[in-house]
Amino acid sequence: LQKAVQWFRKAADQGLAVAQYIIGNMYSRGEGVTHDHKETMKWFLKAADQGHAQAQSKVGVIYTLGISVSQDHSKAVKWCRKAADQGDADGQYVLGMLYQNGKGVARDCIEAARWYRKAAGQGDVNAQRTLGEMYFSGAGGFPAHLELARSFLSAAEAQGDEEARELRIKLDVAARHSPSEFPGLDAHGTRQCTCCGRGDGTELKLARGARGLCIVEKNANALTGRKGTKNAALGNSWRSMI
């Protein structure tokens, strides 16, 4: 590994973005070099400045969590959007989280879902699970849709996501209940997103409030890596991105 570091560093020093990104990953993981958050950020930024999408999303995550730098959600949005616009699934997922929680941008659950769907379409299991939770619970006033919830949760479950499997089981139990037991629908079977005052016109089959910790609160905890919640592991999964 030390020889690999030597050659990648030579290429990185000559300005090759992919080499800079690889060196950043080596410092992040402590592979062939001593683990160093500051060096990680240094090399990711060099690659990100040259338009490397994966490096851009990692810089966004670092600013989101405040690792080796001051936490700055505005910068996180900036870098994640650059990555997301290039089709990077991690950037799309994290940008969705930032929109959902109003970090660095105005809170907008519909826009959050738009980015989650882009990431989910690329097989991002976190985005698939999150969309499934949102469509199942209608948490934060997001328009609920049981069939869409099942679709996204099943996709995440197929990738081995245990939390998605548990929620899909709860969803199947919920589907056996009468629609009258699922509050929150208007006369037309639709509901606007109360978190941001928008609606996407989704027709609702069934809707119910989430039991336990709301998905919005869970994701807000993940933004800071806060422990002591059912979703504390997500904060760690963010760290696995860098």
Image: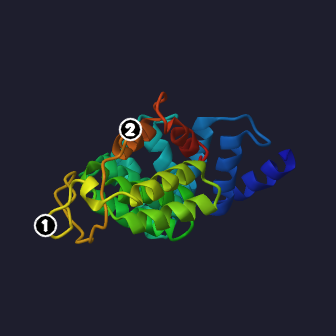
156 horizontally vs 84: left or right: right
Q: Residue at x 35, y 52 (%)?
A: 137
Q: Amino acid at mark 2?
A: Leu
Measured in 3D between alpha carbons, the distance from the residue under mark 2 to the one under mark 1, in whole angstroms, is 28 Å
Q: Give the label, 2 or 1, closer to the camera.
A: 1
Q: Badge 2: how crowded within 10 Å, few (<14), some, or many (20+)?
A: few
Q: What colouring does the structure picture have?
A: rainbow
Question: Observer-nearest residue: 33 or 103?
Answer: 103
Q: Which quadrant of the structure image shows residue 71? A: top left
Q: Quickly name the residue at label 1.
A: 187
Q: Amino acid at mark 1?
A: Ala
Q: Badge 1: how crowded within 10 Å, few (<14), some, or many (20+)?
A: few
Check contact, mark 2 vs mark 1: CB within 8 A.
Answer: no
Q: Residue at x 41, y 37 (%)?
A: 221
Q: Is residue 83 visible?
A: no
Q: Indicate the position of residue 128 as horizontal and vertical percent values.
A: 49, 61
Label 1: state its secondary structure.
loop
